[in-house]
Image (spheres, grey):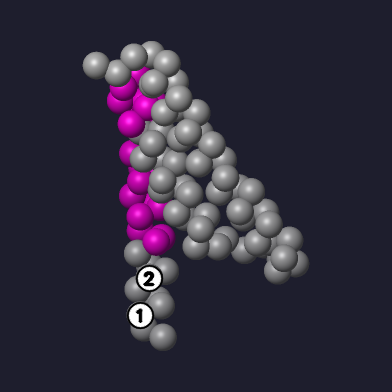
Amino acid sequence: MIDAKSIMIIGFIGQGMFSMRFIVQWIASERAKKSVIPFSFWLFSLAGSVVLLTYAIFRKDIVFTLGQLPGLFIYSRNIWLIKKGEKNK
């Protein structure tokens, strides 16, 4: 069984990954001098959400678990649409 400290570390890693998406988006927008959402935003969103979902499951937190599930679909769908668009070029 995973101990409480390990579960907390998983939670911090997930939150850090999830938060990085905003830093990535901000930097990309500053460079472009307009609001943009780079591909890495969606990757950080998906990775962070997966880790946070894992954390929520370990914590047996149904509210947190259900809160992460819709995001997984949205982030995966955006990644798929971007990749599909690249293939059609």
- Quadrant into which the N terminus falls: top left
Q: Who is closer to the viewer here, 20 or 82?
A: 20
Q: Who is closer to the viewer here, 71 or 12?
A: 12
Q: CA distance from mark 2 to mark 1?
A: 6 Å
Residue 31 place in picture, x, y as percent = 72, 65
Residue 78 place in picture, x, y as percent = 41, 60
- Look at mark 2 in the image and give the residue it sits on: 83
Residue 7 place in picture, x, y as percent = 38, 21
Label 1: element kind: helix
Q: Is residue 4 visible?
A: yes
Q: The magenta stretch spans which residues?
A: 54-79
Specify the quadrant of the image occupied by residue 3: top left
Q: Is residue 84 above or below residue 44?
A: below
Amino acid type of the residue tagged 1 in the rendering: Lys
Residue 63 place in picture, x, y as percent = 37, 24
Q: Which mark is residue 87?
A: 1
Q: Residue at x 46, y 35 (%)?
A: 14
